[in-house]
Amino acid sequence: MTFDGASVLVTGGSRGIGRAIALRFASLGARRVALGYFRGDGPAEQTASELRELGAEPVLVRGNVASTRVAEEVAAVGSLDVIVHAAATGVIRPALETNDKHWDWTLSANARALLSLTRAAAPSMPEGSSVVAISSLGSTRVLDDYALVGVSKAALEALVRYLAVELAERGIRVNAVSAGVVETDALEHFPQKEAMLEMGKRNPVGRLVTPEDVAGCVTFLCSPEAEMIRGQTLVVDGGWSLLASARGVPPQVDESPRAGV
């Protein structure tokens, strides 16, 4: 599998799962990798340096992923072969303890941003290109304190299905990857971190999902071998969600009201 000469955008690409995805594309030959991030210039510059070492040209896009300015900057990057929306945010608390601002922020960053970015980029994306959204198991399961994020991920997966059908005539594939418990910096924002890590290991494989596991599935969905996979959500959790007793919160977000692009 190669992506020689490809131009890729990864939102949330400076850390965690997004970073692993960006580096995987670079290792497979991508010529240019645009990293979207909200704040934290240090991690973004570090990831950019790693991309250069792999032979890819990094492009840094800083700002709120749901903003008009960022969509305009993405359009200005030029033709993209791949868009991966890995940026995520949200307020982790019971539904009745949230407010409308929390709702608007979470839905905008996690779901609407994919539509904004796709509208900006799709007109110049070549036939055979791909869009992949990173979701979580909370889109279909009721998880503790996960109401807003879970709803936003459900909306994201629904949007993936609609975009997959509408963009098929342009030769653009759209899919999603839903990861189980992944040990990244985002876990630090969860009070039940240790319990989640233990829970994540209690799957048929016997270990946690890694960012690299997710990255491998993303690159597969963007490869020619996945030509006939459209509008699907690929679950990458080692079989955790198959267990009748499985409970927990997939750590795809942090609890503060901020978003990465």
Image (spheres, rainbow, N blue to C red):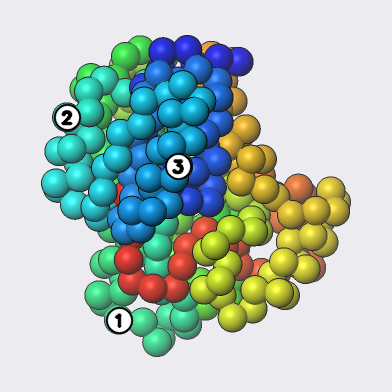
| 39 in relation to 114, above or below | below
Instruction: Classify residue 196 as left or right of residue 143.
Output: right
Q: Is residue 172 above or below residue 140?
A: above
Residue situated in front as seen by the camera: 59 or 140: 59
Who comes first in sequence, dot 1 or dot 2? 2
Disc 3 target residue: 47
Quadrant where the N terminus sits is: top right
The residue lying toward the viewer, choosing from 143 and 61, is 61
Query: On residue 252, which mark appears?
Result: none
User: Residue 210: percent from the left, percent from the top?
Assistant: 67, 48
The picture quadrant where one finds residue 203 is: bottom right
Q: Position of residue 240 (x, y in %)?
A: 75, 55
Nearer to us: label 1 or label 2: 2
**Residue occupied by mark 1:** 99
Hey, what amino acid is under mark 2? Ala
Image coordinates of residue 76 in percent, x first then y, are 17, 29
Question: Viewer-proximal residue, 116 or 261?
Answer: 261
Is residue 157 found left or right of 108 in the rendered image? right
Q: Secondary structure at mark 3?
A: helix
Whichever of labels 3 and 1 marks the residue nearer the N terminus, that label is 3
Q: Distance between the Cα atoms at labels 3 and 1?
A: 35 Å
Residue at x-position 26% and y-position 26%: 122
Per the rendering, the mark at residue 76 is 2
Disc 2 versus disc 3: distance between alpha carbons? 21 Å
Q: Residues within 10 Å of mark 2 (few under 14, many from 20)?
A: few
Amino acid type of the residue tagged 3 in the rendering: Thr
Quarter of the rendering containing residue 58: top left
Mark 3 or mark 1, whichever is nearer to me: 3
* Amino acid on which the number 1 mark rests in the picture: Asn
Q: Report helix, strand or loop for mark 1.
A: loop
